[in-house]
Amino acid sequence: MDALVETILKSLDDDKAQDVLAIDLVGKTSIADRMIVASGTSGRMVSAMAQHLVTKLKAAGHKPQSEGEKFGDWVLIDAGDVIVHLFRPEVRTFYNIERIWQAPAAPANTPLKTGLKTGLKTGIKKAPAKKAAPRKSARRA
């Protein structure tokens, strides 16, 4: 995998990618072991970087899958153990995927505490329903 990462980083460096960031995903997800995020100055540059990277990965014997080259706002390249995200700077700032994946991973045995299950798992009970006040019958005088 180190050779794969080196190929990707060299290609991005050759194409003058900006703000290149490699994120270790081991223990955080099973989709990949590494994620590389980089920016290009324009949609055209992002698309060109993606095309060059896919060509170099294929020449190195990998079978990358890619999406988004047509528009160049955000290109995703799946190279197996490594996922590459190429963005225009504004799009990268908007989605901020680095923040999601750089957060510490939860321990494996930690239950998820979301939605209605939170109350059940933490022992919080619902307040009893209020009883409706008895209706007064309408008296006619």
Image (cartoon, rainbow, N blue to C red):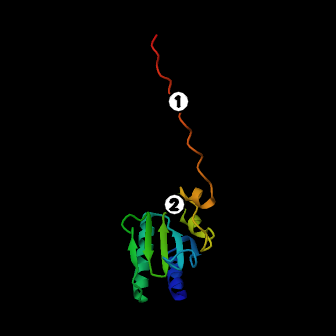
Circle 1: residue type: Pro
Q: Nearer the viewer, mark 2 or mark 1?
A: 1
Q: Amino acid at mark 2?
A: Tyr
Q: Secondary structure at mark 1?
A: loop
Image spot of residue 1 (x, y percent): 52, 87
In the rendered view, would you say 84 is above or below 97?
below
Foreground: 54 or 1? 1
Residue 95, which numbered label?
Answer: 2
Foreground pick, 92 / 114: 114
Q: Which numbered disc covers residue 116?
A: none
Please tell me which of labels 2 and 1 falls first in the chain: 2
Counting from the top left corner in percent of width and height, residue 107 is at 62, 73
Q: Examine the rendered structure and indicate whether residue 22 appears above or below residue 131.
A: below
- Seen from the viewer's position, the closer of residues 116 and 19 is 116
Residue at x 59%, y 64% (from the top left corner): 99
Disc 2 packing (10 Å; few <14; some 14–19; many ≥20): few
What residue sits 52% from the left and 57% below the top? 94
User: Residue most toward the top?
Assistant: 141
Q: Residue at x 58, y 75 (%)?
A: 23
Up the image or down, 126 lies above or below 96; here it is: above
- Using the image as rendered, state which of residue 36 and residue 138 is in the foreground: 138
Q: CA distance from mark 2 to mark 1?
A: 54 Å
Query: How busy is the neighbourhood of tag 1: few (under 14 within 10 Å), some, or many (20 plus)?
Result: few
Residue position marked by numbered label 1 in the rendering = 134
